[in-house]
Image (cartoon, rainbow, N blue to C red):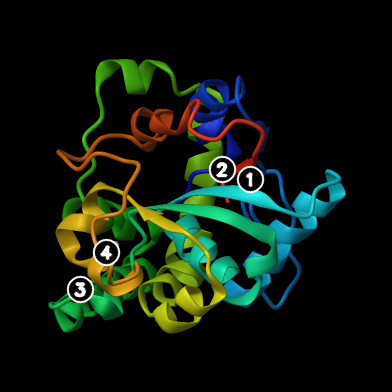
Amino acid sequence: GAIIDAGGFTRVADLLAADYTVITYDRRGYSRSSRHDPRNFEISQQARDALAVLRVEGHEVAAIASNSGGAIIGLELARAHPQSVSILVAHEPPAMRVLPNAAEKLAESATIYRTALLEGAEQGMRLFFQLNPTPRTEADLAATTEDELARRRGNIDFFLKHELLPFANYQPDAAAIRANGVRVVLGDEAHRMGLVDHLVEPDRPGERLLRPGPRRPVDRRLSALRGRRPGLRGEAGV
């Protein structure tokens, strides 16, 4: 998701490790991963990166657990590389174009991007959080290390100037995902925003493993996967 690297999925990995082989990684351009100039951000490349990580670890198929922008990459994996996706848990993918208020949400993203360019990344991120509030408890904050916070701050500029608009403008190919037979499970905000009706099969409009409710950090929700399908290989932090 936005500015978060593999460290943000530590608790998720711990929750799933009893039932899954869990792989997490820092995406291209984030934290401890490298990137090459020119720094064009391509969602298709990010999907291929996820496959490369999976294969380096000796696997061809995975259950994909993904959050926010990572869920957009998960949807691209389900579209373009279905043979490698046994199930996709897409937690709050910011697929603005499928929303009833798409024009409004895309305009907000454009404003955040422009603010980052003209006034700096810090101001742009402040506006991002104002428009996309995510509650955090004391326990959430205590579980985030200073090193992890420093890495997140280092990812802000890249996120706002290279990732934000491609994520916001991504159009999920629901027909292709359905035709590929990939099971997609969407989380809380996705239900409220109408993404479920757009992405899951018509005869299973309410399919979910995650219970809808107030917004909470992703690690509290993905714990619902524990014990569901033992033996599947899980990819957290896509």
Q: Which residue in the structure is indicated by mark 4?
A: 196
- Judge depth for marks 4 and 1 and give the one in front: 4
Q: Is residue 73 visible?
A: yes
Packing grade of label 1 (10 A; few <14, some 14-19, many >=20) is many
Type of amino acid at the residue the image marks with label 2: Asp
Q: Name which of mark 1 and mark 3 comes first in the sequence.
A: 1
Residue 52 appears at what percent x and percent y? 79, 58
Q: Disc 2 versus disc 4: distance between alpha carbons?
A: 26 Å
Q: Residues within 10 Å of mark 4 (few under 14, many from 20)?
A: many
Query: Residue 145's x, y, as percent?
Result: 50, 21
Q: Please, what secondary structure does the residue beneath circle 4 have?
A: helix
Locate residue 112: give its quadrant: bottom left
Q: Is residue 236 above or below residue 20?
A: below
- The numbered disc on residue 105 is 3
Give the image location of residue 34, x and y in percent: 75, 55
- Quote the CA–CA distance across marks 1 and 3: 28 Å
The type of residue carrying mark 3 is: Lys
- Residue 5: mark: 2
Relative to 186, residue 148 above or below: above
- Identify the residue at image location x=50%, y=24%: 11
Name the one closer to the observer, 27 or 189: 189
- Report, in whole angstroms, how far the alpha carbon at label 2 lies from the one at label 3: 25 Å
Q: Is residue 109 above or below residue 234?
A: below
Q: Tag 4: residue type?
A: Val
